[in-house]
Amino acid sequence: LRRRIWRLLMRNVFALTVCLLCTSLPLQVHGETKALVRTSFVAKDDSRSFQQMGAGHQRYESNGIQLSHAVVIADFMLADSWSAVGVINGYSDGEQKVGFSELYLKYRPLVASSIKPEVKIGAFFPALSAENTDAGWLSPHFLSNSAINSWVGEELRTGGIEVSLRQNGRQIRSHWSWKVLGSVFKGNDSTGTLLSWRGFALHDRQSVYNDRVNFLPIPGVVDEDKLNAPAWTEPFREIDNRFGYYVGVHLAYARKAELRYYYYDNNADPNIVDPDRIYAWHTRFHSLTLRYLPRPELTVFSQVLLGDTLMGEHIVDNDFSSAYIGAAYNLKQLGWEDLTLAMRGDWYQVVDNDDVMYDPNGSRGNAFTVSVRYDITSYLSVSTEWQLNSGHQENLRFFQSDEDYREQLFQLAFTVTL
């Protein structure tokens, strides 16, 4: 009963928090709303998507025209120090087509000190990405995310509170700026499921709250005489009634370079399983990101992820790691100021440390992505992207003659921003 009550509260955390604050704040609401619609023409290989419980590692279920994103972002000031942010997402694919990905309150008081506090309460992404820096947690350079941030968009979300302190170097006449933060949360107990039973994927679909993500029905996972788990996960489900946490540090130099480090631990009890046979996974990781602007028209960014996940009494025990390096170059030096070329190389791996023979989890792979974006107007842009993703996944042995895969994806997308 307590888990059901908590799940209900998490589904309505934003509305409940706003209602509580509305009783104590003299509201003078004003703000802005942004909207983005991205439609893509997709040409892919014939592998069935993981969303259809297939072996593919890309989001789209078929060739043709797809609604990649329909995003509404609302940011409203409630009082001098309080604001409310909401992000609603819509897709043509997936189990839940419309829902919210972020809903939170932000408290940023006006203080005389150069060191300023900030508090976020609700549901939001931890700011650990070096590439997803655009509105709605999208990438300004790519149509698909790196393997790391594809997973973050799928399985990772803060449902809780984050407290931070920051100092802007300009205020103290320094080139250096910094931020330290910490968070406690609930609702990420199943994080690690997709990395273990599907492996890393590369796409741009963000799971919304109450969403469900499918994967290949591996016999050792779904059979009643083995793990007896479903071939899907609900990424933000609360299972063990325990709090997770993360801490982070941001360090920036003169708007030319920024380093971010995060340590994340969902603190889940790996021996708990809920009535739907969804397991809790104890998942921890370190994330290090770097953004560097050697010239105004060139941005270089990279991220490294190292972690592990455990489910049951050594039933699933995996280490995972991934890294990428990318660059985006505006071609204004060649007379094409509205044209940007971006490239990214990915590497990823899951290492199976347990001895459960009927559930092999090991996988490894690499991907290369090239994207070109042309801004027709300030409201309309067209992008084209090609991606090659290839690797080795041990549990594919149950469905095909070998354990290797090779996937290609081409996209032509039109993006309208209002």
Image (spheres, rainbow, N blue to C red):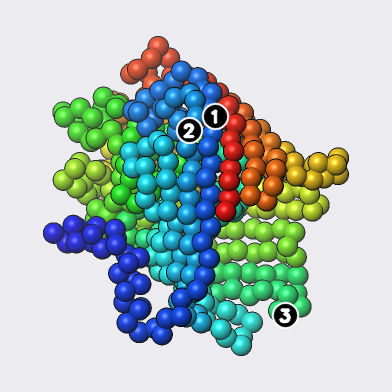
Q: In this view, does 400 lie above or below 120?
A: above
> Which callout, 2 or 3, points at the residue further toward the start of the chain?
2
Q: Residues within 10 Å of mark 3 (few under 14, many from 20)?
A: few
Q: Which residue is drawn at 64% across and 37% down?
A: 383
Helix, strand or loop at label 1? It is strand
Give how far across and how far down residue 277 sits, in percent: 20, 41
Sequence-wise, which precedes: disc 1 or disc 3?
A: 1
Residue pointed to by mark 2 = 66
User: Of the residues shown, which amino acid type is indicated by label 1?
Assistant: Phe
Residue contact between numbered discs 1 and 2, judged by CB atoms under 8 Å:
yes
Could you tell me how far apart the alpha carbons at marks 1 and 2 are, in whole angstroms?
6 Å
Residue beneath disc 3:
172
Q: Position of residue 65 (x, y in %)?
A: 50, 29
Q: Residue at x 70, y 40 (%)?
A: 374
| Residue sticking out furthest to the top | 401
Image disc number at residue 332: none
Q: Which numbered disc, 1 or 3, marks the residue closer to the eye?
A: 1
Quarter residue 103 falls in = bottom left
Q: Is residue 252 above or below residue 271?
A: below
Provide the secondary structure element on which disc 2 rests. Answer: strand
Which amino acid type is shown beneath numbered disc 3? Ile
Q: Which of 68 and 321 is in front in this view?
A: 68
Label 3: which secondary element: helix
Quadrant of the frame with the N terminus: bottom left
Three-letter amino acid code at disc 2?
Answer: Gln
Mark number, residue 41? 1
Q: Where is residue 204 in the image (x, y as percent from the top left)?
A: 50, 41
